[in-house]
Structures are given as structure tokens and as C-alpha cells.
Image (tube, rainbow, N blue to C red):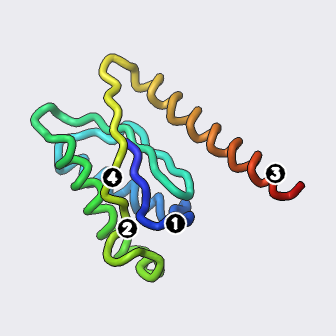
Amino acid sequence: MVFVPVRDDALISARVFGVLRESWEHVCAELGCTLIEADFEPDHVHLVVEYPPTQALSWVVGSLKGVSARRLGQAVPELRSRRRGRHFWSPSYCAVSSDGASAASVRAFVARQKAKARADRASSRRGVEQ
């Protein structure tokens, strides 16, 4: 899954991500899901979640986003002024099924995406500096 904040600027830091991850772990435990992997970039997060077929994906996503946004507002109050209205997360999300793929291959995919994003940012900064 990929979640993006409503704002376009970089809101997600290591501190923010720590609160988010703790929230997601709590939600997953409550829903009978497993948070296999989670990582972040300043403008989005990646989550790999295993959830039972009895749970609707939209319910899992809504719970993950809703609880994490609420807890983030409590733990990092200075973010409230940077949010657009009452919402932290964009209402949209990306979810991809990985049935049959090993957890290791999914983790490797997320790591490659992060490395690619870093390389793209570094390349764009070099272009601005020249």
C-alpha cells in the first residue's frame, strides 16, 4: 500500500514515521492483520500488510489511515498547522496484491523503490545546482 499526505510538501520525518508505524502496528493487531514492512519517503509511505480475507481492503486502509492520523495529531501537534483542514492523508491510496510473492521479494521491491526515489531526488538537486 502507498499512502500520501494531503499536503504536497515533505511532512514525514523519522519522528512522524515512528508514530505512524506504532499506530499501524496497533491497528493491525486489532484487525488480525500483520504489518510485514513499512518505510517512508518525506512525501509518502509504503506498507506491506497481510490481512485476512474476512476483512475488506477499504476497511483496513480506512482504519490504518484514520487511527494513524488521529494519533499523529496527538503526538506531533505542530503538524496540525501544516495540515489541510482536518485531514492528514489524501483520500486515495495505492494497493497491490502480492499473492504468491515471498515477503523477502516484497521487501526487496520496497527497498528498490526507496533507492530509486533517493537517486531521483539527488539527480534533480544536481540539475538545479548546475
What residue sits 51% from the left and 62% below the top? Answer: 12
What is the x, y in percent for residue 7?
47, 67
For the C terminus, which image quadrant? bottom right
First reached walking from the N terminus: tag 3 or tag 4 = 4
Mark pair 3, 4: CA separation: 31 Å
Q: Amino acid at mark 3?
A: Gly
Element under label 4? loop
Q: Earlier in the sequence, mark 3 or mark 2?
A: 2
Left or right of residue 48, residue 67 in this image: left
Residue kind at label 2, given as amino acid type: Phe
**Residue indicated by mark 3:** 127
Drawn side of residue 18 relative to residue 33, left or right = right
Q: Which residue is mark 2?
A: 88
Residue at the top extreme, as displayed: 100
Query: Contact (CB < 8 A) between labels 3 and 4?
Result: no
Return the residue at label 1.
11
* Residue beneath the point at 56% across and 37% down: 113
Residue assigned mark 4 = 92
| First reached walking from the N terminus: tag 1 or tag 3 | 1
Which amino acid type is marked by label 1?
Leu
Within 10 Å of disc 3 (Cα), the crowding (few <14, some 14-19, many 20+) is few
Cβ atoms under marks 2 and 1 closer than 8 Å: yes
Q: Locate residue 31, reporting x and y percent.
A: 17, 46
Q: What is the spatial separation of the Cα atoms under label 3 and label 2, in whole angstroms?
A: 31 Å
Element at label 2: loop
Closer mark to the observer between disc 4 and disc 2: 4
Pointers 4 and 1 in contact (C-beta within 8 Å): no
Amino acid type shown at disc 4? Ser
Question: From mark 4 to mark 1, how far is it between C-alphas?
Answer: 17 Å
Q: Earlier in the sequence, mark 4 or mark 1?
A: 1
